[in-house]
Image (spheres, rainbow, N blue to C red):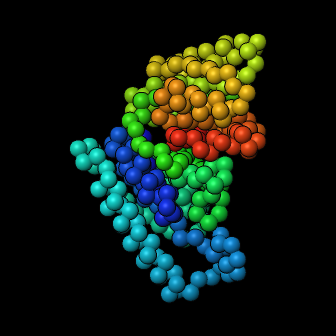
């Protein structure tokens, strides 16, 4: 991965996300795109209008450029001074967040989009609308959500959580996870949470997925971990802590494991407080 895009809203968590992304770019020796959307009034509750006066637009445009420039300077200061110094390009544009981010990701051939995940809903409300969720649904690139408080650590272990119900789709989605793991020389841990101790068929399926990764992508730093837990979120939190996972990845399948985890019960919504970043692939 050689080009990472940070979609920033200048919120309280945005500096934390930017600093995490900068350290990741250093580890990958990648270029950084720092992208901000000038929200059209239709996205702002009770705006009542779509047209902006030119003077207002000019003020918003100027303020955005100043904040992007300051964020860029802060990222450089807080980075590892003895490591690779990524090129940082500041970009912005008016429109809806998902449209601007996806357009710029395509334009600059970004390999990964990085956003902040907040704790006030399942994955968080981003900017003035539920843009985190919208980005998950519409992102044209793998999406990395960085939660509040997730400090950057060298990524030695990447967990891929799966319910093993869409193994072919999982194998396709794992392409970008393997790409990241290979770039970082990280171990890829296939993680399965289950609660039926009498059902052992999953072992054959997860071993087949592991063999598929080795055969299709030629990556051998792959292991398997299973956890007995009635609640998926609790099982994942236990696994993250005890397997020392630095980043968790999931494939976003409609009505699948991902949908169950982030649209289910209040217990399962606790996953919104996971202490490590979440990589969403399709």
Q: Residue at x 51, y 63 (%)?
A: 11
- Give the answer, above or below, for where 198 lies relative to 24: above
Q: Nearer the viewer, residue 73 or 228?
A: 228
Q: Residue at x 41, y 69 (%)?
A: 67
Q: Residue at x 57, y 27 (%)?
A: 239
Q: How many marks?
A: 0
- Give the answer, above or below, for where 176 lies relative to 40: above
Horizontal side, residue 187 vs residue 121: left or right: left
Q: Quadrant of the N terminus?
A: top left
Q: Tell me residue 252's x, y (percent).
A: 66, 39
Res. 18 image quadrant: bottom left
Q: Tell me residue 23's x, y (percent).
A: 36, 46
Q: Tell me residue 169's x, y (percent).
A: 66, 31
Q: Quadrant of the C terminus?
A: top right
Q: Nearer the viewer, residue 129 or 40?
A: 129
Res. 181 image quadrant: top left
Q: Residue at x 63, y 36 (%)?
A: 251
- Give the answer, above or below, for where 7 lies relative to 268: below
Q: Tell me residue 279's x, y (percent).
A: 55, 40
């Amino acid at each position: 991965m050689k080009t990472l895009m940070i979609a920033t809203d200048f919120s309280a968590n945005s500096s934390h996300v930017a600093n995490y992304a900068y350290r990741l770019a250093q580890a990958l020796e990648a270029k950084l795109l720092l992208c901000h959307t000038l929200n059209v009034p239709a996205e702002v509750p009770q705006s009542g209008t779509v047209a902006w006066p030119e003077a207002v637009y000019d003020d918003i445009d100027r303020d955005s450029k100043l904040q992007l420039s300051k964020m860029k300077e802060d990222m450089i200061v807080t980075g590892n001074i003895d490591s690779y110094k990524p090129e940082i390009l500041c970009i912005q544009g008016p429109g809806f967040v998902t449209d601007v981010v996806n357009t710029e990701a395509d334009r600059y051939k970004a390999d990964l989009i990085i956003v902040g995940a907040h704790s006030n809903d399942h994955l968080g409300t981003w900017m003035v609308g539920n843009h985190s969720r919208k980005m998950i649904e519409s992102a044209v690139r793998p999406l990395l959500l960085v939660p509040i408080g997730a400090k950057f650590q060298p990524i030695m272990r990447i967990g891929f959580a799966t319910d093993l119900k869409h193994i072919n789709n999982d194998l396709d989605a794992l392409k970008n996870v393997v790409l990241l793991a290979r770039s970082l020389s990280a171990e890829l841990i296939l993680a399965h949470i289950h609660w039926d101790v009498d059902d052992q068929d999953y072992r054959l399926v997860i071993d087949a997925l592991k063999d598929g990764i080795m055969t299709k992508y030629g990556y051998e730093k792959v292991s398997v971990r299973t956890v007995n837990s009635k609640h998926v979120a609790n099982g994942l939190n236990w696994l993250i802590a005890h397997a020392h996972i630095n980043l968790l990845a999931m494939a976003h399948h409609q009505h699948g494991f991902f949908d169950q985890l982030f649209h289910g019960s209040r217990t399962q919504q606790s996953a919104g407080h996971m202490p490590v970043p979440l990589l969403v692939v399709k």
